[in-house]
Amino acid sequence: MRFEAFSRRAADQRCDCLVIGAFEQGELGTEGAAVDRATRGRVKALLSRGDFSGRNGETLLLPDMTGLRSPRLLLVGLGTKAQFNRRAWRRAMIQAITALAHTRVNSAALALERPAARELDDYYFGRASAEITGSSLYRINDLKTSRRAPRPRLATVFVGPVGVASIAEVRRGLINGAALGESVGLLRNLGNLPPNICTPRYLAAQARELQGRYRRQVRVRIFDEAGIKRLKMGCFLAVTRGSEEPPRFIVLEYRGGRRGRAPVVLVGKGVTFDTGGISLKDPPAMDEMKYDMCGAATVLAAIDFAARAKLRLNVVGLVPACENMPDGRAIKPGDIVTSASGQTVEILNTDAEGRLILCDALNYARRYGPDVVVDFATLTGACLIALGNHHSGVMGNDDALARELVDAGVRTDDRAWQLPLTEEYAEQLRSNFADMANVAGREGGAITAAAFLGKFTQGMRWAHMDIAGTAWLSGAAKSATGRPLALVSDFLTRRAAL
């Protein structure tokens, strides 16, 4: 995709389709009114007849509009003027790109009204425009053998009109938004692949591809099972014991900052399929456990984004990747294993496996002397119960870091919510036989899972993101969502500017 900001009148922009917005009750904004004048009142006449209501997200494609440099005009509903905000603007943008994707349009000029600058400044206007376009044009990487619908032809998008004083910031936003759109595609593709294809070795191969693509910026190291044993990652190895698929520990280093600058370390849960192990899950929706590696996909995509956007920041990605399967060698409730940190863990539930592989990866992060550490995991159904599909959960040992992540989510409409993580939750993990248990009952399950990880992050500034409710959609719309990469990319971009 090619994105450009334009400053001329929308009616004068040469493209295959011009997109403008209209409010309910037939109201037009500044650009809409200018387009109406250029078409000698045809837009207003259409609205006055009631052929287009202006409801938020409604679209109507009009061919052969005289007076414009484009042969087509797409009307998009903005809702009521009094309630027009960033959320309404995003919905209008999504529906506009979706409508264009069903045409043979190669280029389009987006001239929708913008909310107040305090809600959508120049940078985020450009970034969101490119991000929404990429996301709306995404097609699931399915393996169907039937004839496929033709892919959208839209290849060039003009965004504006933009004032001369704003054009540099809009262009910066477009560059980062375009990079984000490509990286979100990588995340979603990995999440949507079936688990017999997207295995730990496949994730390792994807990391190698990133190294090949960004040879000067990204370095990758892959540990096989023997290497993981040398690292004494006993908790990680315990989870993978029941699977025929060999595990991989993937280390990615993006070197965009000055030499010696402490890196941001990102850790992603990479369980490529989770049966629950001996504590077997219920069969309904177990197929969705292929998404249990979305934390790993988030880390790979974050490294891809950092390289595409050329962030002046050092970022390390750590991905413990394995399957959790039941067989005669699988760990059992009551087993005790020793982590890489030397702490012992009593396994009370083998379906609480994500925290076991993450704890060893978090301990490995220490060797980098990190500035901050953030992990991403589809960790607990309890977080889905607490926050639904709308917010990712954020917990950690540093409130300022947690607030950075929450604020990044607000700016990018990829929302997160901070949950408490006080010492009382860690006390629930007491064991009669080991240093700690891996579960602490149903109450506060998302928080006690984070409290478990907190036992391996002392001395580091650390935050945990539970994305179990936001990483994918179920039902007829089943697909990876690409979250929380928008949040992560903003978090990294802000840190690169420090």
Image (spheres, grey):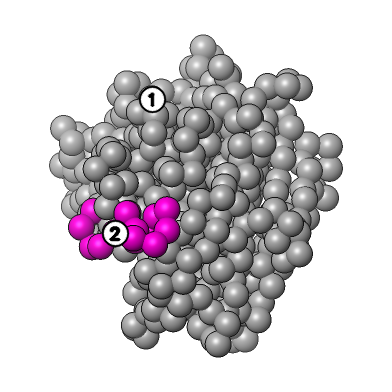
User: Is 26 on the left or on the right of 310, as rendered?
Assistant: left
Q: Where in the figure is residue 366, as x and y percent of width and height? A: 61, 37
- Residue drawn where x is 32% and y is 54% of the image: 430
Q: Is residue 26 above or below residue 60?
A: above
| Magenta stretch contains residue 191 | no
Q: Where in the figure is residue 445, as x and y percent of width and height? A: 28, 57
Q: Where in the figure is residue 80, as x and y percent of width and height? A: 18, 39
Q: Main secondary structure of the magenta part?
A: loop
- Near mark 2 (Cα within 10 A), the count class, few <14, some 14-19 or many ≥20, is many
- Residue drawn where x is 40% and y is 50% of the image: 452
Range drawn in magenta: 429-444
User: Is 48 on the left or on the right of 39, as rendered?
Assistant: left
Q: Which residue is mark 2?
A: 440
| Magenta stretch contains residue 433 | yes
Q: Is residue 391 above or below residue 112?
A: below
Q: Which residue is mark 1?
A: 400
